[in-house]
Image (cartoon, rainbow, N blue to C red):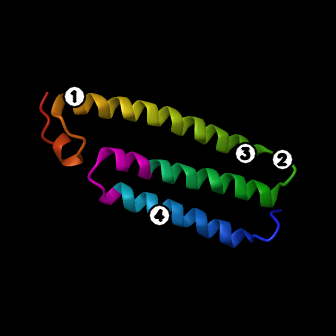
Amino acid sequence: MIAGISIYEILTLSSILFFIGIYGFFTRDNLITVLMAVELILNASAVNFVLINTYLYPDLLQGAVFSIFIIALAAAETALAIAIIINLYRIIYSVEVKDTEIMKY
């Protein structure tokens, strides 16, 4: 158990992180900020994995392993998304979401 912090406080923090990510994903126009919002969503899920594992099975490390997997997946997703955004910028000279809608191939 975590001394001095209840499960409700950490779940509240994780929920706030998740919903800030959802809000940023749906309201931002810049592709970089949309990517940051997706990272917030993934980090909130990693916090939930560690929290639930810590409170239900404190002697096992399965939640930590899943959170490390989520962090590795987020790093790979970020690298791929940044590469795509850089290529889009080279083509249309903008990283705005509305500018990617008018692309013709």
- The answer to which of marks 4 and 1 sits earlier in the sequence is 4
Q: Relative to 72, is 55 above or below?
A: below
The secondary structure type at the circle numbered 2 is loop
Q: Nearer the viewer, residue 92 or 52?
A: 92
Q: Are marks 3 and 4 in contact (CB under 8 Å)?
A: no
Between the C-alphas of marks 2 and 1, the distance is: 47 Å
Tell me which numbered mark, 3 or 4, is placed earlier along the sequence.
4
Residue picked out by circle 1 = 90
The stretch in magenta equals 26-37
Q: CA distance from mark 3 to mark 4?
A: 22 Å
Q: Is residue 67 magenta?
A: no
Measured as percent of width and height from the top left, residue 92 is found at 16, 33
For image coordinates 45% across by 36% down, the residue present is 78
User: Which mark lies nearer to you, 4 or 1?
Assistant: 1
Q: Is residue 55 left or right of residue 103?
A: right
Tag 3 or tag 1, which sits nearer the N-term?
3
Q: Residue at x 50, y 53 (%)?
A: 41
Which residue in the structure is indicated by mark 2? 60
Q: Which amino acid type is shown beneath numbered disc 2?
A: Leu
Residue type indicated by callout 1: Arg
Check contact, mark 4 vs mark 2: CB within 8 A.
Answer: no
Mark in front: 2 vs 1 = 1
Verify CB contact (< 8 Å) between mark 4 and mark 1. no
Q: Closer to the N terminus: mark 4 or mark 2?
A: 4
The disc placed on residue 64 is: 3
What's the amino acid at mark 3? Ala
On residue 21, the disc is none
Q: Residues within 10 Å of mark 1 (few under 14, many from 20)?
A: few
Magenta span main SS: helix
User: Spatial distance from mark 4 to mark 1, Cα to Cα?
Assistant: 32 Å
Which residue in the protein does label 4 denote? 19
